[in-house]
Amino acid sequence: MLASADNMRLFNPVKGWVQFADQVDGDGKTLSFGANRDIDLALSVAMNASNLMVLTGAGASFCAKNPAQGAPTAPGMSDLWTAVEAAATKETFQEVIDLIPKAKATDTNIEKLLTQCKIYVELFNNESSKKIQTFIETAEKAISKRVSFVSNDTDIKAHGAIIRKIARRGVRKPRAKFFTTNYDLCFEYAARAQRFTIIDGFSHAMPQIYDRGHFSHDIVRRENAKEGPDYIENVFHLYKLHGSIDWKRRGADIVRAEGSEPPLLIFPRDSKYQEAFEPPYLDMMGAFQSSLREPDTALIVSGFGFNDDHLSKPVMAALEANMSLKLIVCDVAFLRDDVLEKGDHTIAVESPVREHASGYFERFKHLARIGDQRITLLSGRFEDLALAIPDLVAQTERERHLDRMQVARGFGDGVQS
């Protein structure tokens, strides 16, 4: 299905899930108003908040596509399971599953399997635990390789649209903060393509070295005729909550670099709750929790399944403590495919969330139903949301000039003197 704002639905506590577009008859007469105006208003209010946050997870990367046939795409849990099985060999994979009592019930969920493997290694010190430790190392290498799928050719239009609309807001407001649990480089490549500047804790000198103090830096334009700082446009903060495939540890430093060293990642397993509170992830978590408590804060969540308690619980705690917090959650988990396929303009309030969806989605629905107007719930994908977000800031002359120069360079090779 092509990305479109029309794919989205808004949860109305009285009516139900209302389709984005108006319902019209064959003569073009409006039979029922859609949710487009309410969605636009909710997103506009969020965009104008003093403190704007975005939280994304694996669902935000599924729209990134490589043009070559057979090229890797963003993996889901079952894809990671397949990658690990291929790297470890089916025989070794099955042997590990046979050693762990409850492994057969993991149902291609690599996170559950690695969690049980880690527990086994901690409990036992025998030949089997050594074999499982080797399997864990093989699995982590396979996962690192599988999540590295983004290149200059990858279609990341949705990420570019989100960045362009959110990170380009007025420079007098604090910089927008993007938080993601993804290891991939979708946001980095999208920012690079549009010449946006990322503040992510790494220095802008080579080699790029991580220091939490860099998050307090900003970028200004200095001209002799002006007094005081002139903050440049198109800058945002990026927090990789579970690490990144281009983070490497070299000695005492964390650097962004290519190389054969294993990347610094919090791998999928239950212990990621504890690992998230170790440097450098502690800095990212600290920024996430403190930002949620700022006055006049808006948090837009898309593609994040609320399966990570170390992130989900702070959101719930902020809803309890921060009366000025506005929460917008956009996810496909709210409505099952068979319900959507009926094509009803409005879907009943009681429609259950998808099977295996986190319990937080029902909690958000309950809060909205009992009158919490701070919460806006949208059924849709990350790429649909990217098109629905209003573009509040007009393109600057500097951006138009960049577009013209990129077009000119594209014709450069064919120009003859």
Image (cartoon, rainbow, N blue to C red):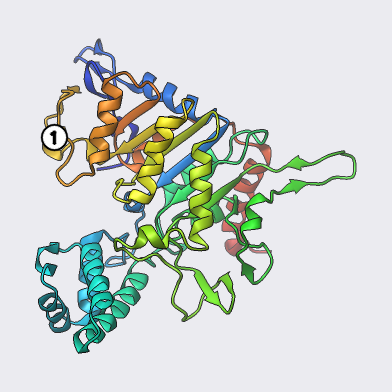
The residue labelled by disc 1 is 341
Task: In this rendered view, identify the residue nearer to me: 292 or 263.
Answer: 292
- The residue at 23%/64% (across/down) is 79
- Does 336 sit above or below residue 102? above
Task: In this rendered view, identify the residue nearer to me: 105 or 413.
Answer: 105
- Does 84 sit above or below residue 240? below
Horizontally, residue 280 falls left or right of residue 70, namely: right
Quick check: can you spot residue 21? Answer: yes
Horizontally, residue 99 falls left or right of residue 315, namely: left
**Dot 1: what SS?**
loop
Quadrant of the snapshot with the N terminus = top left
- The residue at 50%/57% (across/down) is 282
Horizontally, residue 230 falls left or right of residue 115, namely: right
Task: In this rendered view, identify the residue nearer to me: 380 or 313.
Answer: 313
- The residue at 64%/64% (across/down) is 416
Residue 217, given in percent of the width and then of the height, sits at: 69, 51
Residue 77, given in percent of the width and then of the height, sits at: 24, 60
Residue extending farthest bottom: 127
- Does 390 sit above or below residue 134? above
The part of the image, by quadrant, that contains residue 139 is bottom left
Neighbour class for label 1 at 10 Å: few (<14), some, many (≥20)? few
Residue 411, given in percent of the width and then of the height, sits at: 58, 57
Quick check: can you spot residue 190? Answer: no
